[in-house]
Amino acid sequence: MRCDASSWLCGGHVSVATTAPTATTASPSSSFLCKTTVSCCTAAPKGSSSSSSSSTGYETSRPWYKQEQYSHAPPDVVRHWIQAENQPLASRDRFSVASYNILGDRNAFWHRDMYRNVPSKYLKWDHRRRVICDELAEWNPDIMCLQEVDKYFELSEILAKVGYVGSYKRRTGGSVDGCAIFWKPENFRLLEEESIEFKGYGLGDNVAQLSVFETQKAESRNVVIGNIHVLYNPTRGEAKLGQIRFLISRAKILSERWGNAPVVLCGDFNITPKSAIYKFLSKSELNIMLYDRRELSGQRDCHPAKVLGAKQEISSPLTMIDGLLKHCWTDEEIRVATGDADSHLVVHPMKLNSSYATVQGSTRTRDPNGEPVATSYHSKFLGTVDYLWYSDGLVPTRVIDTVPVDVLQKIGSLPCKKVGSDHLALVTEFAFKPGTNEDNKETAASSSRKAFSKL
């Protein structure tokens, strides 16, 4: 959730996609996996999507760093799975998705003032790379959606050794980071992908990814995965809303093209659970004229001193009147937010729910709305901006719980020894609802034939 920085790489835009092998083609790393990843995957808790197991312990086989570099000290942060109360019957049709803003290497030092409480050794990329890969190996998700990736080729080489392939979309303009999706080709086959450059729609230099996957099982199912890093600027609510609105509309089109496939939208949305844009995502519509565009994201109320100090501001009549006077929108701002300068109502076509708000957690880690109290923490921000939204056809069966605020407060700031970013990774296991895609298999099959006939 950082501001853009000037590029130190070659100029222009970089977009890389590594195509997943088909069901009949072995993964390039399959021979390596047979030797090393069985024990690596034992970090996944019992009942996870991985079927591998070993009694030797996962730390002995991690390919991204030597064993002597691994610390056996207890972790500073302990996270665990929380099971949903109502489990669906179709337990075989499950898959896990992670969303993680990994903090770009350039951003970590460009905005050093945000991390003044972080020891320099924990901010260095060499350390954070190891810790991030450590975290990802422990959760062992089928699909990863990463944001602020400015070391894509380095990460892709590491993750290939444990069975992942990926695609990447770099931000436009002078930024050096972008979004990346990694997946296990043994579990999912890539059917179609779309990269979104918001600059082409007057919505800034941020980017997003959409990928359609087919499960590699006897009864295959399709799912649309979205990955976005929304504009950070807390005062540009109209641009944030426009980016999210556009992503949902494109996801809906892909869903319909592939047999009304269910959708999961991951990312750093740079909005808080109390914000108007959160309401737009969860309620499907929003009248923007009821809000000050500079307050649409809710981020300006999340300074750690304010959050931890429990100091509540009481709105006086003068403050309320001043707020109403600020609800002025220009025609251009309305167009950016809603897509139509003549419309004050922005609507999206999907019913979306947040996986973490759906799976009940502890009061130590959740706010009154059920969302995590914090998914990001540094000297200027403490709050939740990361989400996994899902549509009809899916149900979350469990999530990795976040970290209690009192623990974060003792740590002082992220990153730390056992967390490689200023964000916490979110991981959700989903199950397909019985009947998902069954009534429209022919539509999906027809779309698949058309898509592959063009290859």
Image: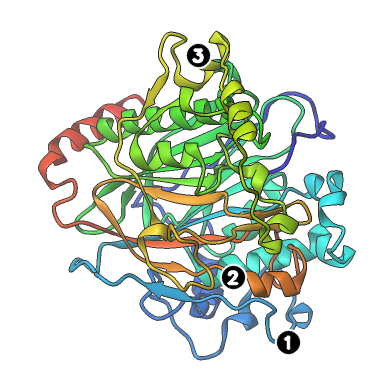
Left or right of 343 on screen, residue 167: right
105 lies above or below 320? below
Q: Position of residue 67 (x, y in %)?
A: 73, 81
Q: CA distance from mark 3 to mark 1?
A: 54 Å
Residue carrying label 3: 335
Which numbered disc flags the more N-terminal residue, 2 or 1? 1
Which numbered disc flags the more N-terminal residue, 3 or 1? 1
294 lies above or below 367? above
Q: Which mark's residue is nearer the viewer, 2 or 1?
A: 2
Q: Position of residue 450 (x, y in %)?
A: 26, 27
29 lies above or below 328? below
| Circle 2: residue type | Val
Of residues 351 and 160, the one nearer the viewer is 351
The crowd level at tag 3 (other Cα within 10 Å; few <14, some 14-19, many 20+) is some
Residue at position x 14%, y 39% in the image: 440
| Circle 1: residue type | Ala
Q: CA distance from mark 2 to mark 3?
A: 39 Å
Question: Where on the picture, by quarter, is residue 260?
Answer: top left
Q: CA distance from mark 2 to mark 1?
A: 19 Å
Of residues 336 and 197, the one nearer the viewer is 336
Of residues 148 and 221, the one nearer the viewer is 148
Residue at position x 42%, y 8% in the image: 342
Can residue 309 be seen in this snapshot?
A: yes
The colour scheme used to paint the residues is rainbow
Which numbered disc flags the more N-terminal residue, 2 or 3? 3
Image quarter where the C terminus lies is top left
Can residue 422 be seen in this snapshot?
A: no
Residue carrying label 2: 403
Question: Where on the picture, by quarter, is residue 97?
Answer: bottom left
Residue carrying label 1: 73
The crowd level at tag 1 (other Cα within 10 Å; few <14, some 14-19, many 20+) is few
